[in-house]
Amino acid sequence: MKTRAAVALGAGKPLEVMEVNLEGPKAFEVLVEIKATGICHTDEFTLSGADPEGLFPAILGHEGAGVVVEVGPGVTSLKPGDHVIPLYTPECRQCEYCLNPKTNLCQAIRSTQGAGVMPDGSSRFTTLDGDPILHYMGTSTFSNYTVVPEIALAKIREDAPFDKVCYIGCGVTTGIGAVINTAKVEIGSKAIVFGLGGIGLNVLQGLRLAGADMIVGVDLNNSKKEMAERFGMTHFVNPSEVEGDLVAYLVDLTKGGADYTFDATGNVNVMRTALEASHKGWGESIIIGVAPAGAEISTRPFQLVTGRNWRGTAFGGARGRTDVPKIVDWYMDGKIEIDPMITHTMPLEDINKGFDLMHAGESIRSVVLY
Ligand code: NAD
Ligand code: DAO
Ligand code: ZN
């Protein structure tokens, strides 16, 4: 079949919206009509060329929601008409990683997903001239129709609006999951969140859900304060307005350091501040942000000797097929909010405007509606 897609032809170039060929689903694959997709910082990271694993030409996009159109041989868990969210972190429920409760990093299709192809080693996308186009994160939601492995699709309830729950495909789950699955924040905790963008706001609402008492937000941009308060932030700090050492300021504000800190900036200097602002003896600092290629973190080892813990999280530690439908329920039951974070919507033809809004810091989430 043919489908409309925004194709990343090369690093640093705008996406080009064009018709491409899409081959049908092979064994254990599913053809999905994408109804809506968010534009995430990570798509921008890859498109910019900063992602060392970025491959071109490719169809980016990993924050979508849609409907199953056709299933390939061997697919048993989905049928045409099912509503789904594609997962860049699959859940095969059989591999060594899926069987270990300490991780969500299913490895069943890791090597082919990283190479931009389906598990059989080939791409389903080609240009109208027949040249291959690669998949991205196993999802390629910047295409109206896409093929996704069965183990990388979460089946969700049919009354959930695609234009909102697509955000659960990355940002919502990453932020809330970092709090609930990775940090396992307890009621009454003190927390600091660095970076109040699309991920940080969801860390805030995760902390509110977990019953944290003090929720400090840190951002260089004062315009982030209002929305952050709406999502549970109790105190705001702009580092550029703090005189003296930021760590000392935050330790004083939290009366000894925070029980939990979260980096949602991707800046390695911020990651160090986050670790050192966590409480001596038991503080945990969770890295969510993805740093530029080659960047390294550092601190004095004595920070760890004296009981602070440095950890990371991918997709909020969530097992997508199991956890994503539950997060959709939380949204539908009013336990979490998504609507105010979808600040812009646009048709596929205008997708580059979504990237412009992100660069200008004017959007939290732009969503493409097919
Ligand atoms: P964003 O651009 O929307 O937000 C980043 C925020 O950080 C902005 O508000 C910005 O003003 C603030 N900021 C920048 N530098 C700062 C500094 N020095 N001090 C304080 N605040 C600062 O980005 P986002 O979509 O929220 O993504 C955040 C990070 O999370 C990115 O690195 C992204 O790649 C990463 N991410 C990780 C995962 C994962 O699974 N681990 C998933 C999705 C995104
Ligand atoms: O198993 O090695 C692996 C792959 C893990 C991928 C985790 C990706 C999380 C960070 C990227 C942000 C995605 C939007
Ligand atoms: Zn697995």
Image: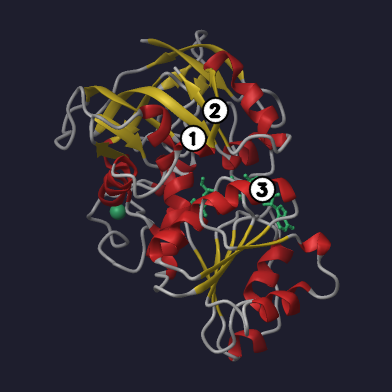
Amino acid residing under circle 3: Lys
Question: Distance between the Cα atoms at labels 3 and 2?
Answer: 33 Å
Q: From the viewer's perspective, is 69 left or right of 331? A: left
Q: Is mark 3 within 8 Å of ligand 1?
A: yes
Q: Which mark is residue 136?
A: 1
Q: Which mark is residue 58?
A: 2
Q: Residue at x 32, y 24 (%)?
A: 32
Camera-side residue of 120 and 78: 78
Mark 3 or mark 2: whose residue is earlier in sequence: 2
The image shows residue 186, relative to residue 112, as above or below, that is below
Amino acid residing under circle 2: Ala
Question: Distance between the Cα atoms at labels 1 and 3?
Answer: 30 Å
Question: Distance between the Cα atoms at labels 2 and 1?
Answer: 6 Å
Q: Is mark 1 within 8 Å of ligand 2?
A: no
Q: From the viewer's perspective, is 298 left or right of 185? A: right
Q: Which quadrant does the N terminus fall into? A: top left
Mark 1 or mark 3: whose residue is earlier in sequence: 1
Q: Position of residue 38 (x, y in %)?
A: 50, 32
Q: Residue at x 16, y 37 (%)?
A: 77
